[in-house]
Amino acid sequence: MEELDLIFDEAKEAMEKALHHLESELRKIRAGKAHPMMLESVKVDYYGSLVPLTQVANVNTLDGRTLTVQPWEKKMLDPIAAAIMNANLGLNPQNNGEVILINIPPLTEERRKGLVKQAKAEGEHAKVGIRNARKHANEQIKKLKDEGLSEDDMKRAEEKVQKLTDEYVAKVDNLVAAKEKDILTV
């Protein structure tokens, strides 16, 4: 039935979006190693507009503990350093007149536990999004029952949606577990 296929496609798309959002949120949680994605959320005042850092500078890793930010315009060094400080990432940028160096301090045990909690909370948000997609799909299936869908077809459709939900919840659990392992690895 065409309507059922459309419902499954919509549910899968919504679940996929929740998974992609989780991946992007987990990338922002640092695991003690320097990674350019750590500065993804930094917005810089560029001639009166707030723009992502990556639009005014190159961000690279010098080694496992140091990030370098190379602005495309020298006069952007101070605004970039200020933006990194204001982003509340717990980082202390050093401006040497050419580039900005950011030393990533090693994580304390307490900080690691806090980051694991944060990762798990993001995982729960993703699961809520997946469950909302399931709920929406099941509501649409029930509407089709009112329009003549048989009881057996409705049950099969709901089982298919539940199987899809279980699949995506397992993917979320795997992502969170991998991030937790990454954070706790010293």
Image (cartoon, helix red, strand yellow):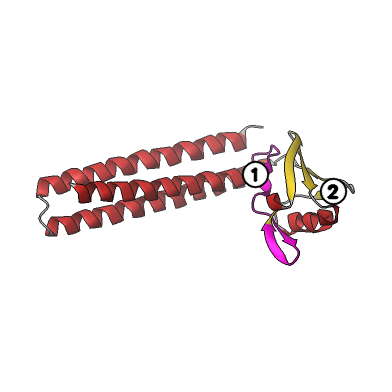
Could you say which is closer to the camera, residue 42 or residue 54?
A: 54
Q: For the residues marked 2 and 1, what is the alpha-carbon distance in whole angstroms?
A: 18 Å
Name the residue carrying label 1. Answer: 37
Q: Tell me the kind of residue under disc 2.
A: Gln
Categorize mark 1 by other alpha carbons within 10 Å: few (<14), some (14-19), many (20+). some
Measuring 27% from the left and 51% from the top, which residue is drawn there? 7
Side of 40 where 169 appears, left or right: left
Q: Earlier in the sequence, mark 2 or mark 1?
A: 1
Q: Is residue 110 visible from the viewing direction of this image?
A: no
Could you tell me if residue 98 is visible in this image? yes
Residue placed at 84% from the left, 48% from the top? 94
For disc 2, the marked residue is 94
Residue 38 shown in magenta: yes
Task: Tell me the magenta residue range.
Answer: 29-51
Q: Residues within 10 Å of mark 2 (few under 14, many from 20)?
A: some
The answer to which image quadrant residue 42 occupies is bottom right
Q: Position of residue 84 (x, y in %)?
A: 74, 54
- The image quarter in which residue 63 lies: top right
> Residue 113, image x and y in percent?
60, 43
Residue that protrudes farthest toward the right in the picture: 97
- Say whether residue 59 is magenta: no
- Secondary structure, mark 1, is helix
Say which element carries label 2. strand
Three-letter amino acid code at the position of disc 1: Met
